[in-house]
Amino acid sequence: MILSEISSKYTNYRLKKIKDLEISVNNENNVIKSTSSSPERFNVNKKVKLKTLPTLFSIGKNVEYNVKSLKNNPNIPKTVASNDFIQKFEKYALGMGIECVGYTKVHPDLIFKDRAILFENAIVLTKEIDQFAVENDFPEKQANDLKLYDEFGKKTNELVDYLRENGYSAQASHPSGGFVTYPSLAQSAGLGWIGKSNLLITPKLGPRQKISAIFTSIKNLPVNEDNDHSWISDYCNNCGKCIKTCPKNAIIEKSEKFNGSEFIPELCKGCKDICTICMKECPFNKRKYSHLKSRFEKISQ
């Protein structure tokens, strides 16, 4: 009991330290700040087992590195990248296990309140959540989930260092929290579409991915101008399985946000503990994207 209380106090201390570090980015020169329409960042108080604390501390260390490493940005960064470099970057990212890479411009409304980013140019990354971990409950499920966050965060920082080594400035945004709302950013990058559950749905993985981002000085990123996944919105409006199966009623069909539904993170069991029911029951987890799209198009004719 005493050990648990000590670890809880230390965890809260680290979380406050991380929050203060992230907010300190507002003091950098020429930053892009949040707006009055920006969302609050929901800070999860997870019920964690003691044996997962080393992984949590590793996550915290890498989140701190997101801010502390900004001093490593070049004094006069490059702002233009060749097609050859973009291809090399993508090859490097995919080679380390990143699933998809997308590009977009960050609208200030997507930046969390009290946070700021150095550049509007964003590289969006996704990492697969194993299907077995989504569809099954097992003792190490939480540990596996935290390990994925930790590994993905490290890889995001590694890609930031790669950009800096090649003369570009960059700012990492960790998958466990970050500076922006990720589903909307990834949708803007053309990687997929936000479903009723507020999860990003993509052709390769359905709802089974975590998301991180890198903000960079590269002004000529191959930004996606079109999104072929908007049909998912209509599909979700005719489905609603995530709403029906949520054990805590954290998804309600109430507002116009997120395809006519509202996500309430304070009620989400997955945010506080470990729950993947909305991912598991999503048709995009059970069927191929192409199959669902073809069937939807036939019904819609």
Image: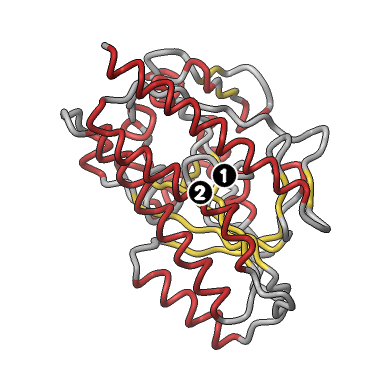
Instruction: Describe the element under mark 1 as helix, strand or loop.
Output: loop
Q: Position of residue 11 (x, y in %)?
A: 43, 28
- Looking at the rendered structure, the number of numbered marks drawn on it comes to 2
Tell whether 67 sits left or right of 146: right
Tell whether 298 sits left or right of 186: left
Residue indicated by mark 2: 174
Q: Position of residue 185 (x, y in %)?
A: 62, 50
The one of 275 and 190 positioned closer to us in this rendering:
275
Amino acid under disc 2? His
Q: Residue at x 60, y 23 (%)?
A: 262
The one of 100 and 74 positioned closer to us in this rendering:
74
Residue indicated by mark 1: 178
Disc 1: CA contacts within 10 A as few (<14), some (14-19) or many (>=20): many
| 257 relative to 204, above or below | above
| 169 relative to 82, above or below | above
The one of 147 and 286 positioned closer to us in this rendering:
147
Q: Give the alpha-carbon distance from disc 1 to disc 2, as whole Å.
A: 5 Å
Tell whether 107 sits left or right of 276: right
| 16 relative to 108, above or below | above
Q: Which color scheme does this rendered protein use?
A: secondary structure
Q: Residue at x 79, y 46 (%)?
A: 33
Q: Disc 1 vs disc 2: Cβ atoms closer than 8 Å?
A: yes
Quarter of the rendering occupied by the N terminus: top left
Q: Residue at x 31, y 39 (%)?
A: 145
Disc 2: CA contacts within 10 A as few (<14), some (14-19) or many (>=20): many
